[in-house]
Amino acid sequence: MNTDTTTIVSESPTLLIVASEVGEKENALEFAAQEASEVAFASSVSTTEYSTEPTTCQIAVVPTLEEIENEIKTAAQRRIEAARRELNDTRSRIERERNSRDAALKAAQVRVKSTQTELDGLAGDRAEMERRAQTFLSGDALKATMEKIHLAFNVRQLELEDALAQANADAADMQTEIQASTISDGLELQFTEQNLEHLETAAPDVADAVRLAADAQENLIAALQAINDGMLRDAQTLLDKAKAGKADSTQVAEVEQALDEANRAQITRDIIARIEAQADQLGAVRRIKKLMDEAQAVGVEDRVAAVAEHALELARQAANARYAQTRPIADHLASEGFVPVIGDGRIEVWKPVTKGSRNHGTSWTLDRVMVLRGEGWAIELPTVPVTRKELPERVQSSRWFKHPARSDAAAAE
């Protein structure tokens, strides 16, 4: 007896099933499929590896608040700059279109005016031509010419009337278009401005920076103009705005140099005017020297040196003249027992006051002050008594001061 043998091999290399009977083929196939699935499942489970390490997608760098803020500012800057460009482009386009429409309307109005003028003068031209024809022609020639004149002028009149009507229609259409465009342009411009205003309101600091950057060049030009006009404070303000807007460094340096030179020139003029105002005033020598020190401190001493030296010479001459006038007065006061201290147009009069015996020493009091005013001397009395045990250095340096010790020694001799 022959026996059919069927061999079924699964995808797993370890599975082998043998069926010896023909009737058992179907059951063997089902059994083989079930065994193959179980073996595959066991194999997949046994070969699976587990890892506790985080995957790449799970690793993320947390941004800082400053980075987020900078990112938002960058986006805001781009949006605001784009909105400003759109607004400027819209304004430029509207201006160009408005100028074009105005030019077209003017051309239409000129056409209307010229056509109307020609039409108004047509009757006169006809009469003139008829007069000449009547002057030089006669008979049938005159009759034929007159008919031609009438026909030609009638045709020309019709042509001019049609041209005038068309020109008036064109001018009216142009005016209507201008009115409609004015409304639509105004709405478009308003919408664009509102968009920019909305963005600037959301980020005012960024808007200020963008505005300064956009106006930087104009601020530089305005700063130069302000320098030329002598408005140096306004020039400094405009220059600061241009620098804040990151204007071109080379141009900024040029404007800064021009402003610095203008400031130095203004300071020079001011100091020279103040020096010249001293002239022969009281105390001019001291004040002129102080002004020269001030000029040296700001670095313009070389610009005022010549004027200062000349003014100083005049002031010294005037002071010497006043000193010559003061000496006789001081000699007289010294002869009366006072100690005069001479200044430029000023005399301090000190008076010795002896208290008790000679061992108690001498104290000094300021008796009066004499001031030269015009051609005469005015006397000023101290409102509060001024008394000194030791005289100030300027008093002891006076040529009319005699030290008490010297006076005592002279009296002993």
Image (cartoon, rainbow, N blue to C red):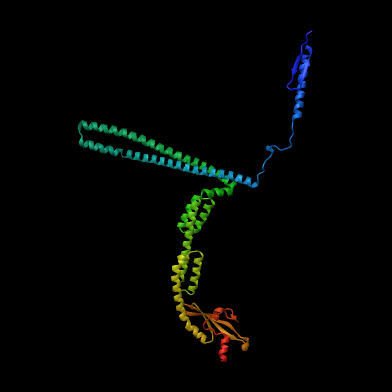
- Taking the view exactly as shown, the residue that stands out farthest to the bottom is 413
Based on the displayed image, in which of its 4 quarters is residue 175 positioned?
top left
Q: Is residue 174 above or below residue 33?
A: below
Can the viewer see residue 32 in this picture? yes
Quadrant for the N terminus in the image: top right
Observer-nearest of 133 and 256: 256
Give the mark count.
Answer: 0
Q: Position of residue 244 (x, y in %)?
A: 54, 52
Q: Is residue 403 above or below residue 298?
A: below
Observer-nearest of 216 and 169: 216
Observer-nearest of 18 and 133: 18
Based on the displayed image, in which of its 4 quarters is residue 72 positioned?
top right
Observer-nearest of 144 and 25: 25
Q: Residue at coordinates 29% horizontally, 34% vertically from top-left?
A: 153
Q: Is residue 356 left or right of residue 116?
A: right
Q: Position of residue 85 (x, y in %)?
A: 52, 43
Q: Is residue 39 left or right of residue 93?
A: right
Quadrant for the C terminus in the image: bottom right
Can the viewer see residue 27 in this picture? no
Q: Residue at coordinates 48% horizontally, 73% vertically from top-left?
A: 285
Q: Position of residue 224 (x, y in %)?
A: 47, 55
Based on the displayed image, in which of its 4 quarters is residue 16 positioned?
top right
Q: Position of residue 226 (x, y in %)?
A: 47, 56
